[in-house]
Image (cartoon, rainbow, N blue to C red):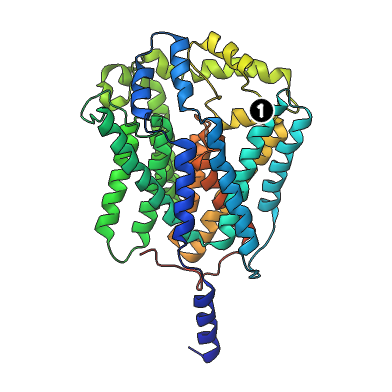
Amino acid sequence: MSVLEMNRAAAGAETRPRVPWVLLIFVTAAFLVIEHDFSAPKMFQQMMTAQSLDEFEEISSMFVPRAWRQLGGLSLGALGMAAFLMRRRSGTQTYDMLGGLMLFFLGWCALSLLWSDEPGQSLRRLILLTMLGVGAAGLASITTPRDLLALAVFAPLVYLAAGLAAEIRAGTFQPLEATFRFAGTMHPNQGAINWALLFFGAWALWKGAARHRRWLLLLVIIAFGLVYLTKSRTALASLVAVMLVQYGMSRGRSGKVALASCAIALAVLFTLVGPYLFSSVPEGVTFRRGGEREAFGTLTGRTQLWRQLAGFYEDKPVLGYGYGAFWNETRSWDVMDEQGWPISHAHNAYFDTLLESGPVGFLAYVLILILGIRRAFVYYWRTGNTTYWFFASVLLFCALDGMLESVPILRGALTFFALSILAYLAFHRAPEAAATSESPA
């Protein structure tokens, strides 16, 4: 190695920040305030035994963050602003189509205040989205991609400890029961997102680790088991689909074709025999939560919900109802009265985006996901850095989970992780193949 190369390496070592554990703890604590509740196990049990829609909705609404929890979102925005002020100009920042689309989408959401029929509600949710975006971009400006990978493992482990304590205290931790769903400090469907992030983070560390591989593999297995225990079918299916896509992308062309053919055949077979399969095997295996064969055919009532929402969309097909404005009290009760179960979102991130932001916002959202996923894969193939494998997995999970859930756009932890990843990919220069490969050990 030449003297010049040694100087460059030394300079890079000096400027590369250490893992900012204070920041990671701060973000973990902020989302603990925003999304978590130690009474969640008892609330979930009450929700499962509710006798009427009104009672069910009253208990279900307790999982929705209260107004005071918005302080957690404001704290993340303050963190982002402070990060922008303290960061050093390194010349690594850049700006391209992906970054432009992200800023355009945020601007379009802000512009929708002009035609929103619930401007107050739109403004509150827009402020929270902005705070998450500023926090994510600020964090990305003073940390490395590896730090976000550390956060994806650290935060869920903290929430797991809190969740186990809450379940044991409430006397609801009975994992051997067929009807048990692990709630912890969140609704099981929301908790499954944290365990999926833990799974992807631990797998990325395991892929690149030189040491402690057995412990990391054990963490992967635990994370997968936690997703299973939540009995969140969408999260589990999305996780498995992400891993299949990742496996297929690592194969040659013939392997990709074989994997795609197998996936299509399984999808067709599942569609044809799924209703009969789900009606005959044990409840604990299929995640049937008191449903019948008809529930499978309607995706647990989603297809009926989407048909009704399509009628609402036809009323405002160009601009939408305004960011975060569709699910007001009147329309929510109209939908719940017809569907017969508590609903606060479309159970489809793309449909919700279409209702709120119209075709323009919908197209921007889809393009952001496509460009982000593609760039994460390119960076992974270029560098071999498994952090970018983690980036691609999380964005793929958002894309797939969003087909049957709205969690990716509900201004929570998954939204924050996706925004942080996109900020890294959009506003930092592309890594070089030899200089940016990191050892995740």
Residue at 71%, 51% (x, y): give it: 100
Q: Quadrant of residue 280?
A: top left
Relative to 398, is 226 on the left or the right?
Answer: left
Mark 1 sits on what residue? 121
Does residue 375 sit above or below 33 in this rendering? below
Relative to 369, is 22 on the left or the right?
Answer: left
Which secondary structure, mark 1?
helix
Can I make out residue 372 in this image? no
Residue nearest the observer in this picture, 365 or 261: 365
Does residue 20 sit above or below 234 in this rendering? below
Relative to 21, is 177 on the left or the right?
Answer: left
Can I make out residue 229 in this image? yes
Residue at 28%, 26% (x, y): give it: 180
Relative to 134, is 421 on the left or the right?
Answer: left
Residue 283 position in % (x across, y down): 27, 21
Residue 36 position in % (x across, y down): 43, 36
Q: Quadrant of residue 370?
A: top right
Of all residues, the one furthest to the right in this rendering is: 114
Of all residues, the one furthest to the left in this rendering is: 176
Q: Can you say which quadrant of the picture contains the C terminus?
A: bottom left
Residue at 57%, 57% (x, y): give it: 140
Residue nearest the observer in this picture, 7 or 173: 173
Query: What is the three-letter code of the residue carrying label 1?
Result: Gln
Residue 297 position in % (x across, y down): 43, 17
* Numbered label tally: 1
